[in-house]
Amino acid sequence: DRKKMESIEILVQKLRRVNSSHDEARIDYIASLCENSNPDHRYISEIMLASGLLLTPSVRDFDFHPSGHPINPELFHVLEQTKGGTAAPRGHRKLVFDAANEILAGRMPAKCGRGATGQMVLRDVCSEIEKLLRGGGGIPKRDDEGGERRRWQWKSAVSDDVMGTSVRWIDPESGISGPVLDIERMIFKDLVNEIVIGESAAKI
């Protein structure tokens, strides 16, 4: 409806201003939210900022979207309007967006401690996705025929969870077993594989 479209347009304008590099003296707000210059971290920051999750004082109070995801899936298309001629391909951003949403869905709000803030969640989601991408040898990756193919490798991340090294957004006194998260990751792996297979089929 008209109100929704007006809200989306306002959001797009704000994100464009935040991402603007015309004024070098202006403080890059998105960059200030990230702990490094990794473009995927920056994109995740944009996602969480636009959704309102990043500024939430308590993550446990954040309401899920009616779709069942923490973040409205349609937000991806809104963010794409701000990208223009950016170097990262749309398909890569789509994978990162969906991955972040699935990670959040698997942990919120039950696994978030009362003191968990949006900034804490941002840091941990960035860390999780970086491990997943690093395990795959980088994205995109070229196959033997020279075509561009994106691959996610999950073994290292699952192994980290089994060893208990993965970050948890929980209170120190509460104990949540690693195997529960392992099962969630297996489901997550299947979902992302479907996305990758679908993209590959569309290119054939």
Image (cartoon, grey):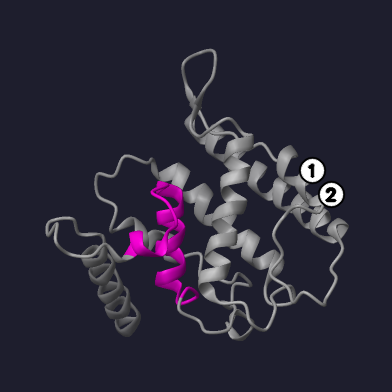
Q: Are marks 1 and 2 in contact (CB under 8 Å)?
A: yes
Residue 198 lies in quadrant: top right
Q: Nearer the viewer, residue 2 or 26?
A: 26
Residue 105 picture location, percent across and down: 66, 67
Q: Which residue is mark 2?
A: 162
Q: Main secondary structure of the magenta part?
A: helix
Q: Nearer the viewer, residue 3 or 172?
A: 172
Q: Amino acid at mark 1?
A: Ser
Left or right relative to 127: residue 89: left
Q: Is residue 33 magenta?
A: yes
Q: Around disc 2, counting alpha carbons within 10 Å, would you say few (fewer than 14), some (14 to 19), or many (20 or more)?
A: some
Residue 8 picture location, percent across and down: 32, 74
Left or right relative to 175: residue 30: left
Residue 124 lies in quadrant: bottom right
User: Which stretch appears magenta?
Assistant: 30-54
Q: Amino acid at mark 2?
A: Val
Q: Which residue is mark 1?
A: 159
Numbered mark located on residue 135 in the image: none
Q: Is residue 195 magenta?
A: no
Vertical arrangement, residue 148 with respect to residue 133, above or below = above
Q: Residue at x 71, y 52 (%)?
A: 188
Residue 77 picture location, percent across and down: 39, 60
Question: Which quadrant would the N terminus be assigned to in this image?
Answer: bottom left
For marks 1 and 2, give the CA distance: 5 Å
Q: Residue at x 39, y 63 (%)?
A: 46
Residue 10 picture location, percent across and down: 26, 76
Vertical arrangement, residue 87 with respect to residue 182, above or below = above
